[in-house]
Image (cartoon, rainbow, N blue to C red):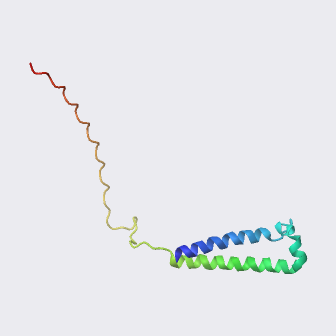
Amino acid sequence: MYSVLVILAVITAVLLTFIVLIQESKGGGLASNFASSNQIMGVRKTTDVVEKATWTLAALLVVFSVATIFFAPRTVDRDSVVTSAKTEAPAAPQAPAAPAAPAAPATPAN
């Protein structure tokens, strides 16, 4: 369930980004490029749809974010390193083993 909520939150965030970019701002925004949709639906209706979509996606993102907290995986061991009563000394590092001595050459028997 956690993975599903995270995926839905990411999809919602991406859609919200696109909707915000489409909105008409003081500089015109990307919405000024969609003049044909303004002629079909009317300028005011297009603005209303984009604004409602923005608020809906923002609310969904908040809901998914809060719901993700409840389904987040939790660790079984709740002891903290700082508050742990037992403090174990770290194991001493072992010295590397000495290399094996080279084998003595065999002497021929006379």
The foreground one among 9 and 35 is 35
Q: Is residue 87 left or right of residue 108?
A: right
Residue located farthest toward the top when viewing the structure as drawn? 110
Q: Is residue 44 left or right of residue 101?
A: right
Q: Is residue 104 left or right of residue 80?
A: left
Q: Quadrant of residue 81?
A: bottom left
Q: Quick one: quadrant of the C terminus? A: top left
Determine the residue positioned at 65% across, 76% down.
61
Q: Position of residue 63 (x, y in %)?
A: 62, 80
| In the depicted structure, whether residue 62 falls above or below residue 93 | below
Determine the residue positioned at 85% across, 70% down.
34
Q: Position of residue 4 (x, y in %)?
A: 56, 75
The foreground one among 85 and 10 is 10
Residue located farthest toward the right when viewing the structure as drawn? 39
Q: Position of residue 87 (x, y in %)?
A: 32, 62
Q: Across the whole image, how many numbered discs are drawn on residues? A: 0
Residue located farthest toward the left when viewing the structure as drawn? 110
| In the depicted structure, whether residue 107 falls above or below residue 32 | above
Q: Is residue 107 left or right of residue 48?
A: left
Q: Quadrant of residue 86?
A: bottom left
The foreground one among 4 and 99 is 4
Determine the residue positioned at 31% across, 48% down.
93
Q: Position of residue 97 (x, y in %)?
A: 26, 41
